[in-house]
Image: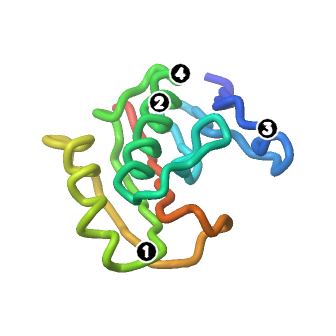
Amino acid sequence: MTRQLISSGSSFEEVAGYSRAVRQDPWVFVSGTSGFKDGQIADGVVAQAEQCMATIAAALEQAGYSLADVVRVKAYITEAAFFEQIAPVLGKAFKGIRPANTTIVCGLVDPRMKVEIEVTALKA
């Protein structure tokens, strides 16, 4: 299959020259995804993580994949204490799937962002 570029419709994708996700069978690579929706972002890290997962699920669906196909998760958080808060969100999304996961404490590009999540999916 040829490469499929998937957009969330964010104008920033064009400005920064990236896609929300790229499907190159049998893989889908979903870019780091924040809690922004329609230019707005919730203040709480849990709400942000939930929006991250909703955006990721939508991108996977556009590619013909689902959260069940995820084999790798990387979560970036701005404070170590946020891990305990986002863990249940990830646990709910990946219950029974149990992909490999790395969580990194770091700064993010917008001070309102508390979490950013990226995933890799594979169809065998």
The residue identified by callout 4 is 62
CA gap between label 2 and label 4 equals 5 Å
Identify which residue is drawn at 34% across, 54% down. 46
Image side of residue 50 versus residue 61, left or right? left
Q: Secondary structure at mark 3?
A: helix
Query: Does the CB distance between marks 2 and 4 fall below 8 Å?
Result: yes
Image side of residue 96 versus residue 94, left or right? left
The residue closer to the viewer here, 51 or 106, is: 51
Could you tell me residue 66's position as x and y percent? 37, 28
> From the viewer's perspective, is residue 35 above or below residue 79?
above
Eye-nearest disc, 2 or 3: 3
The residue identified by callout 2 is 60
Could you tell me residue 43's position as x and y percent? 48, 57
Eye-nearest disc, 3 or 4: 3
CA gap between label 1 and label 2 equals 23 Å
CA gap between label 3 and label 1 equals 27 Å
Give the quarter of the figure containing the C terminus.
top left
Dot 1 crowding, Cα within 10 Å, few <14, some 14–19, many 20+: some
- Amino acid, disc 2: Leu
State the count of labels: 4
The residue identified by callout 3 is 11
Query: Does the CB distance between marks 4 and 1 fall below 8 Å?
Result: no
CA gap between label 4 and label 1 equals 27 Å
> From the viewer's perspective, is residue 61 above or below residue 43?
above
The residue identified by callout 1 is 104
Image side of residue 67 versus residue 120, left or right? left
- Amino acid, disc 4: Gln
Q: Which mark is residue 46?
A: none
